[in-house]
Amino acid sequence: WLNELIGLGELAHAAILGARGVEVRPNAGGTSIGLAGQVVLAHFDAALRPRAFVKSATYHCLRVERTARGWRLVAFLDL
């Protein structure tokens, strides 16, 4: 699903700024997590060339953890 968000941003000529209304739903066994929410996009001029394009997310060292402020996801992106 991370790669779907990257593709959405590229198709919409937009940068992903964040998310809102995110619900984290661990399954009963605690072996997987479901997410639901809205992505916040900032559109940019399609004629401008970004310094780098995000190609994909890598799941190497992917972390989803609960903190005192809520949930945090850490992922690495390939450029």
Image: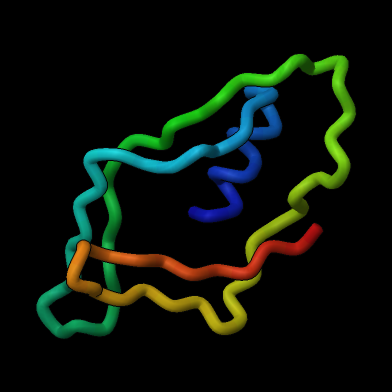
Task: Measuring from the top left, give residue 7's x and y in whole percent.
Answer: 65, 40
Residue 77 image point, x, y percent? 68, 63
Residue at image point 60% right, 52% down: 3
Q: Which of the 4 image quadrants contains residue 32?
A: bottom left
Q: Vertically, is 77 above or below 9?
A: below
Please say if 49 is above or below 79. Answer: above
* Residue at image coords 58%, 74%: 59
Horizontally, is 27 left or right of 13 in the view? left
Question: For the C terminus, which image quadrant?
Answer: bottom right
Q: Nearer the viewer, residue 67 or 1?
A: 67
For the image shown, how many numbered marks are present on the structure? 0
Judge by depth and name the residue closer to the eye, 56 or 76. 76
Q: Residue at point 48% right, 70% down?
A: 74
Task: Decide: is 74 above or below 1.
Answer: below
Residue at 18% in and 71% down? 68
Q: Where is residue 67 in the image (x, y as percent from the top left)?
A: 24, 73
Q: Is 34 positioned to the left or the right of 17 in the image?
A: left
* Residue 75 falls in image quadrant: bottom right
The type of colouring in the image is rainbow
Q: Residue furthest front?
A: 68
Q: Residue furthest left?
A: 28
The picture quadrant where one finds residue 65 is: bottom left
